[in-house]
Every structure is written in C-alpha cells, then in structure tokens.
Amino acid sequence: MSTDRTMRNAPNAPIAFLKGHGTENDFVIVPDPDNDLDLPARAVAALCDRRAGIGGDGLLRVVRSAAHPEARAMAGEAEWFMDYRNSDGSVAEMCGNGVRVFARYLQRAGHVAAGDMAVATRAGVKRVHLAKGTGPEGAATEDGDITVHMGRAALPDDEVTVTVDGRDRPARHISMGNPHAVTFVDDLAQAGDLLSAPPVAPASVYPDGVNVEFVVDRGPRHVAMRVHERGSGETRSCGTGACAVAVATARRDGQDPARTGLPVTYTVDLPGGRLLITERPDGGIEMTGPAVIVAEGHIDPAWLAAAR
Ligand SMILES: N[C@H](CCC[C@H](N)C(=O)O)C(=O)O
C-alpha cells in the first residue's frame, strides 16, 4: 500500500469531523471508514491545536478494521478500529476515554445500538457496553454510561520515582497497554502546575514516555487524581490513568481480587468528572463513565493540506 495516502477520491471535498469528550478528555473525531485520509503527526497536532485548529487532547480516526493494516486481524471481532493519536500527533496504544467517545460516535452514526459491541485498538479488541440512559419521566434515552472492558493491568516490579516540588516520590509502574507512573500525594496541589512532564526515573523504564498520575484519598475505595498525559500534557481526565490509579490504590490497600475472589470497585474523581473502575477476580478491569458528542462540522481540505 502506498505510504502517501492522501484522499483517493474527491481530493477537495470537505472532511467531516465531530467533537466529543469523556469526563472532559476531549477529542477530534474524524470518520474515515475506508482509511483514505493520510493524517501525519503535523496534521493531527494542527487539528488538536486549541487556537489555530479545532482543539482536543487527542484525535480519534474511525476506520473499518478490515481497511487498516494494524487492525485487519481484529476485523472478525470488531468492525471498527480506533486510530488514536495524542494532541502532539504521537500514536498511543490505548485511550480509555477515547473508546467511550468512539462508541458514542458509532451509536450516533447508526453503526451500533445500545448494548454490547467491540472496538479494535492498538492494545487489542475492547468489549464495550452502551447502557440505556433515563430521561425525564423515566423515558429510556441513548446517552447512558458506557462500560469498557479494559483488559488486565500489568504491574512490572520496577522501582520508579516521580520528581515534583524538588522531591523524588516513589511511584508504581502500571501498564494498561500504555505506560503509567502512579504516585500518592497528600494534596493534589503538590503535583505543581504540570505545565511540563514531571521527571520520571529511571527514564529507561519508559523509553517511549509515560503518563504520570497523582492520587489523593477521598475515602474507602474513593480517590481523586490529576494526570500529566504523554503527548497531551495535563488533561481533565484519563481513562487508562484512572484504571492504573485504581489498581495501584487497591494494591496499596492490600486489595487483590485475584486473591480474595471478590471484585473491587473504586470511585475515581478527576478534574473533568467521575469514573468507576472495577477490577474482577480474573484480573479484568472495567471502566464506566459518560461520553458526549458536542458538535460536528467540516475541515477545509486546503487548510489541512497546508497543515501536513
Ligand atoms: N496520552 C496517553 C493516551 C491517551 C490516554 C487517555 N486520554 C485515556 O483516556 O486513557 C498515552 O500516550 O499513553
């Protein structure tokens, strides 16, 4: 397949996009079912730019799995592939909030209905349940919370530290398909302004960068967090980060469903909203939260061509 896949058909046709968010982790959504659009990192960064572009923490390109070489093998399980990019244009393995917003887009576009479906991602196929919502007078609606089966967390036994406020703080290395370093603080303000990536050591543990989470306790199985995301900076919410935080907190509290045989659910409060994270005895992690499509429009193809 040619590497320079610009628009194969109608090169000057306006390019549809939508804007959506999950607990205020926001995304530019670009439907591209036949994998026609070539969106290099520069173009993604331009689209995610909050002043000169549309604005977003990341971009979700919606591609039929059968049309994308990285997803073709998953096409039998999941018709659609979430081509996720961070706002700097970098590719990440997984985006938890992104999967919920992606599923909400597919529902709005009529590709799926409320109930069970699956999304292909670079971290494998994720099963998703779109619940019915309840409107005024108890009427069923199409905007209920969405649960994503996130798979298992990996907890490598690396000793890592995060440096904030001049202090090296011990952190827990957790992978949700993408890398996280979770550290506990007494007050979320101790994370500082998070205008740049907090130094994590040893850097060798995270050769491709890392998402860094700061956690405070709010009560039994209830925490609050802030996150500096790899490739996006501080965001209002991070789904995979909330999963990493829930697992790190459970292990700190001596909770291990694989040992107790009982699932454990954590309430995770983020600046942008609340997520519920359940770890099952088989290690599977489920994330439940909202997803909203805010707007839709068209990208000027000449603008995009100049942004490439
Ligand atoms: N910045 C992350 C990807 C997005 C994760 C986050 N937005 C989520 O909801 O999981 C990374 O580079 O691994």
Image (cartoon, rainbow, N blue to C red):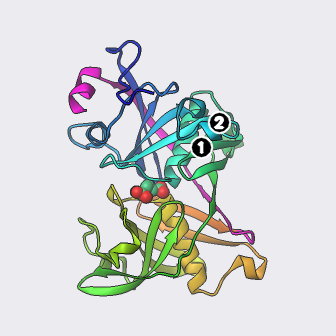
Q: What residue is rendered at 52% in x and 32% in y?
A: 63
Which of the 4 quarters of the picture holds residue 306? top left
In the rendered structure, the answer to whether residue 287 lies left or right of residue 157 reads right
Q: CA distance from mark 2 to mark 1?
A: 8 Å
Q: Amino acid at mark 1?
A: Ala
What residue range appears in magenta? Answer: 280-308
Q: What residue is rendered at 75% in x and 72% in y?
A: 281
Dots 2, 1 in contact, CB < 8 A: yes
Q: Nearer the viewer, residue 105 or 248?
A: 248
Q: Which mark is residue 75?
A: 2
Q: Amino acid at mark 2?
A: Ala
Q: Is residue 303 magenta?
A: yes
Height in image: 64 above or below 153?
Answer: above
Q: Residue furthest top?
A: 10
Q: What residue is rendered at 39% in x and 66% in y?
A: 210
Q: Nearer the viewer, residue 65 or 275?
A: 65
Q: Is residue 5 magenta?
A: no
Q: Nearer the viewer, residue 14 or 282?
A: 282
Q: Secondary structure at mark 2?
A: loop
Q: Residue furthest right?
A: 261
On the rendered image, what quadrant is the C terminus found in?
top left
Q: Is residue 145 visible?
A: no
| Disc 1 target residue | 120
Q: Looking at the picture, how far across and down is residue 235, in whole percent?
A: 36, 58
At label 2, counting other C-alpha atoms closer than 10 Å, the crowd grade (few under 14, some 14-19, many 20 or more) is some
Which of the 4 quarters of the picture holds residue 37? top left
On the rendered image, what quadrant is the N terminus found in?
top left
